Image: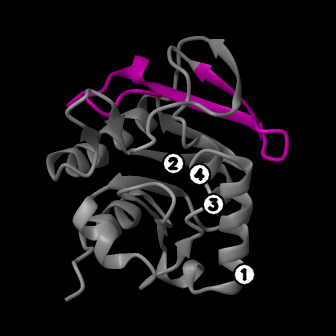
Amino acid sequence: MIDEGYIKFHCNWIKSNLTEKTSITNLNYWRSKLYNQNLIGAYSDGIGYGNLSMRLVNNVFMITGSTTGNFKTLTDKHFAKVISYDILNNALTCEGQIKASSESLTHAVFYESIPNANAVVHIHNNALWKSLINNVPTSSPHIAYGTPEMALEIKRLLESSSLKEDKILVMAGHQDGLFTFGNNLEEAVNKALSLTIKK
């Protein structure tokens, strides 16, 4: 069973209108490339999957909102700005017309841990997931998405594996789920689009 789409952190949501139009346009452009390849989308039960984010300043970042995977095109109301977070206390504060993605704490730990990571992508693809699991940096199958444990697991992998160089993570405990990251959205998205199934 795919565990997907549920926010697991304490969300302090400040409902407001976002003003970062250029960032939203940029995110939408690159998101459409992932959506067109079904790397972001929705399952047959309507639950959306996949998200992407970009760093704004320091560890503040813009991210697609919760439950937006099934929309082909997003508008300003489908994005959230994460302005602060507390991984150990499983809490996050965001602004916008929608709550931040359920994967936001995982995005946050990449930004916190890798100074030159300015974009993070989370995609779903079963064939790639099965092919790449344990062939690239892979999280423990006992760790669920969107939890402090996942954030700490990523920190561990950044120190003990080739994750920082490979810029790809398979989530063994989150069926179909993979992460890529890069210096910008172009690099992070193209990394996801370039993944091939290992024979």
Residue 91: x and y in percent read 77, 33
As measured in the structure, the alpha-carbon distance from the residue carrying label 2 to the one carrying label 4 is 23 Å
Determine if the magenta segment contains residue 74.
yes
Determine if the magenta segment contains residue 84.
yes
As measured in the structure, the alpha-carbon distance from the residue carrying label 3 to the one carrying label 1 is 12 Å
Circle 1 residue? 159
Nearer the viewer's eye, disc 3 or disc 1? 1
Q: Which mark is residue 47?
A: none
Q: Secondary structure at mark 4?
A: loop
Q: Earlier in the sequence, mark 2 or mark 1?
A: 2
Q: Residue at x 61, y 68 (%)?
A: 116
Circle 4 residue? 144
Q: Secondary structure at mark 1?
A: helix
Q: Residue at x 25, y 51 (%)?
A: 34
Q: Amino acid at mark 1?
A: Glu
Nearer the viewer's eye, disc 2 or disc 1? 1
Circle 3 residue? 110
Pointer 3 and pointer 1: residues touching (CB < 8 Å)? no
Circle 2 packing at 10 Å, graded few (<14), some (14-19), many (20+), is many
Q: Amino acid at mark 2?
A: Met
Circle 2 residue? 54
Q: Earlier in the sequence, mark 3 or mark 4?
A: 3
Q: Residue at x 51, y 59 (%)?
A: 173
Q: Secondary structure at mark 2?
A: strand
As measured in the structure, the alpha-carbon distance from the residue carrying label 3 to the one carrying label 4 is 17 Å
Span shown in magenta: 66-95
Circle 4 packing at 10 Å, graded few (<14), some (14-19), many (20+), is some
Q: Amino acid at mark 4?
A: Ala
Q: Secondary structure at mark 3?
A: helix
